[in-house]
Image (cartoon, grey):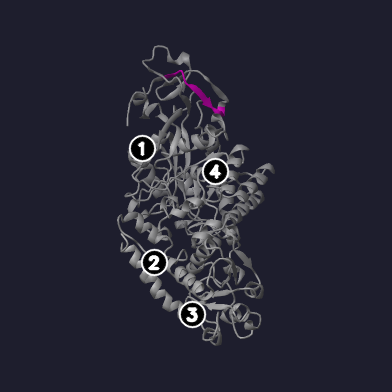
């Protein structure tokens, strides 16, 4: 991994795509002291000019759904390895989910994660606080205190508050601090014991399924709460056709809800489970082809504004077990760009600017932060994409500490070529591509 | 290898090269030797599999015996009907060519073979039906049900039987039952499987 401390750059020759500023043209991008500037500001500055002809320059990608596993499961991932994986994947900002051990449900824990991020992180790490104490879904977390130490959002990800009244009060209380609420939508009674999607394949394979209704019920609940309270709610990893339809209805009616899709729900379906490979086990589960297409349609028509990885590292020891006993989750930071470029752009479902919007504008709007654009004066977080390179995904090249992905050997078209954070090049394969 | 988790033999066979693994039942997924012995028994008694009407009754959802029987029977050309409480009889099986019947009488009246599955109500945390009494009343095979079941129909059960629940003793021990022959055939069929995978023909 190339680490150049230099932070003055002239990026030349690339197609620059910045959805926030409606830019899509070949132009130069100027970076001075880690900030995006105009040409005039570069007069007399000692900067390195990179010829990026044939590449795409975009605002740094944002992943609002990442598990860095530190503290608690540092055998699976750490802030260092997780942010290295983020950099290699083209992500300059990651939102770290709170289901660490201990849980990020108090100010001290948030401070600790911020210290870790400061010390070990090579991309921006935004801590996400819990909605409920201990993710138990019983008592409200100290949301004001969490806000005062700078959490970017709140989520009980991996769990879902089942008590609707408590959820209502969380959503309302959090609105005082203008924090986005991100919900893992799952009715636990309906999903209990389910290890895959309930449908044709679960019935044939004799495995307990999670019906789509388990997700749809909580999406409906959240839409009703958002309408009733006027407060924003974001739906994590939307996976089922009716979930997309419900969100479409809600957004058309002005209800303040958003949704994200994961690369694996875009690329894969439950037919893969027939090999009992635990790298296909995640929650929500891979669903049917019809559901997969609905997620893609949701991305196309703007119902889903965000692509997020749900990067969930697990050790080989944890995953190399019977399907029933394996933990849920796969890593995604280093495969998101190749997989979504291949599945969405090169298959003609989204244009490149539309895809880049799902990684930049959509997440920035959810987080209400001045990131995800190449606006003059903003931090020079930049992702360089090589849009047409054909390659085979090889897990042995990953920076993540874990290898739990179903995409090893996947034939991809397009990948990240370089990543800049605050003007510092934190990842580059530009030299080897020459 | 018998295992509580579906796919455990598949997992192990990927990990162990040059080693035959015989699946002796994995979770609710598959029980191939039980299906082989059931098919052998049907063919022994009826002379064929193709064209036979086979009804499988009971907890299909959690049954590896049902799944393996369905694959084997469909492959050999039998007509398969499944029935039982709707909570335990998924309609998805229609997609592979199985008839899903909500009425027990319709399911069994033209059957050449009725294969009954063990109900494990006591082991299930979830309520799929109100109780064994109600199960016996609506889905159990008893002397009353024999009024609409042909005297030529074979009664099968993979054992152990919940007597008086899915099957009344009078039928289990009656002239149409081939349950003990299934046990006998099971020994021979499993010996044959081990003989073949041990490389005896190589």
Identify the residue at the far bottom of this view. Answer: B170
**Seen from this angle, which residue lies furthest front?**
B47
Q: What element carries label 1?
A: helix
What x and y, as percent, mark residue B199?
Answer: 31, 62
Task: Give the labeled residue for mark 1.
Answer: A84
- Residue B69, given in percent of the width and then of the height, sits at 50, 67
| Mark 3 surroundings within 10 Å by alpha-carbon count, few (fewer than 14), some (14 through 19), many (20 or more) | many
Q: Residue B3 carries which label?
A: 2
- The CA span between labels 1 and 3 is 63 Å
**What residue is shown at x 39% (from left), y 68% (from top)?**
B24
The residue mark sitting in front, 3 or 4, is 3
Q: Which of marks 3 and 2 is in front?
A: 3
Helix, strand or loop under label 2: loop
In magenta stretch: residue A11: yes
Marks 1/2: CA–CA distance: 40 Å
- In the picture, the disc for residue A260 is 4
- Principal secondary structure, stretch drawn in magenta: strand
For disc 3, the marked residue is B179
Q: Does residue B83 lie above or below A261 as drawn?
A: below
- Mark 2 or mark 4, which is nearer to you? 2
Q: Which chain carries label 3?
A: B
Q: Mark 2 lies on which chain?
A: B
> In the drawing, does residue B37 fall left or right of residue B200?
right
Judge whether residue B126 can be spotted in this image: yes
- Is residue A83 shown left or right of residue B49? left
Do marks 3 and 4 share a chain? no
């Amino acid at each position: 991994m190339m680490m150049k401390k230099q932070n003055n750059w002239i990026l030349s020759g690339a197609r620059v795509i910045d959805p926030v500023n409606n830019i899509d043209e070949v132009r130069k991008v100027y970076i001075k002291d880690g900030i995006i500037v105009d040409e005039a500001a570069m007069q007399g500055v000692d900067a390195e000019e990179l010829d990026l002809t044939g590449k795409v320059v975009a605002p740094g990608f944002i992943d609002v759904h990442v598990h860095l596993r530190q503290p608690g499961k540092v055998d699976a991932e750490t802030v260092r390895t997780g942010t290295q994986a983020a950099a290699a994947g083209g992500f300059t900002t990651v939102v770290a989910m709170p289901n660490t051990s201990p849980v990020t449900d108090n100010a001290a824990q948030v401070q600790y994660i911020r210290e870790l991020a400061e010390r070990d992180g090579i991309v921006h790490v935004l801590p996400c606080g819990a909605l409920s104490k201990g993710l138990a879904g019983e008592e409200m977390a100290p949301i004001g205190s969490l806000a005062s130490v700078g959490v970017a959002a709140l989520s009980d990800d991996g769990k879902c508050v089942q008590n609707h009244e408590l959820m209502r009060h969380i959503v309302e209380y959090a609105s005082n601090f203008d924090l986005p609420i991100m919900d893992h939508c799952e009715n636990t009674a309906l999903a209990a014991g389910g290890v895959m999607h309930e449908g044709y394949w679960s019935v044939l394979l004799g495995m307990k399924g999670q019906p789509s209704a388990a997700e749809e019920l909580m999406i409906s609940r959240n839409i009703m709460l958002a309408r009733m309270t006027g407060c924003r709610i974001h739906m994590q990893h939307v996976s089922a056709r009716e979930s997309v339809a419900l969100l479409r209805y809600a957004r058309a009616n002005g209800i303040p809800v958003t949704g994200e899709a994961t690369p694996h729900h875009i690329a894969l379906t439950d037919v893969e489970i027939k090999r009992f490979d635990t790298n296909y086990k995640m929650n929500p589960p891979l669903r049917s082809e019809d559901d997969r297409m609905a997620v893609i349609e949701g991305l196309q028509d703007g119902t889903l504004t965000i692509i997020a990885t749900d990067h969930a590292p697990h050790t080989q020891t944890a995953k190399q077990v019977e399907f029933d006993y394996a933990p849920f989750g796969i890593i995604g930071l280093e495969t998101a760009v190749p997989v979504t470029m291949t599945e969405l752009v090169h298959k003609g479902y989204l244009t490149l600017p539309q895809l880049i919007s799902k990684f930049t504008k959509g997440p920035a709007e959810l987080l209400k932060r001045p990131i995800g654009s190449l606006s003059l004066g903003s931090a020079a977080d930049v992702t360089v994409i090589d849009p047409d390179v054909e390659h085979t995904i090889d897990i042995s090249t990953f920076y993540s500490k874990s290898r739990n992905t179903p995409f090893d050997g996947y034939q991809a078209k397009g990948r990240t070529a370089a990543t800049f954070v605050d003007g510092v090049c934190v990842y580059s394969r530009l030299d080897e591509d020459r | 290898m018998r295992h509580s988790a579906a796919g455990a033999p598949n997992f192990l066979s990927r990990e162990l090269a040059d080693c035959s693994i015989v699946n002796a039942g994995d979770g609710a997924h598959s029980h191939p030797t039980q299906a082989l012995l059931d098919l052998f028994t049907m063919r022994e008694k009826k002379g064929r599999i193709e064209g036979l009407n086979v009804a499988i009754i009971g907890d299909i959802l959690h049954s590896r015996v049902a799944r393996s029987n369905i694959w084997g029977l469909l492959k050999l050309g039998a007509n398969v009907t499944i029935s039982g409480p709707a909570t335990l009889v998924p309609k998805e099986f229609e997609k592979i060519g199985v008839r899903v019947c909500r009425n027990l009488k319709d399911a069994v009246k033209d059957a050449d073979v009725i294969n009954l599955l063990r109900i494990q109500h006591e082991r299930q945390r979830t309520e799929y039906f109100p109780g064994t009494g109600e199960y016996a009343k609506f889905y159990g095979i008893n002397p009353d049900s024999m009024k609409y079941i042909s005297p030529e129909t074979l009664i099968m059960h993979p054992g152990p039987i919940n007597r008086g629940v899915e099957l009344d003793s009078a039928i289990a021990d009656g002239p149409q039952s081939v349950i003990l022959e299934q046990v006998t055939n099971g020994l021979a069929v499993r010996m044959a499987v081990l003989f073949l995978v041990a490389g005896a023909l190589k």
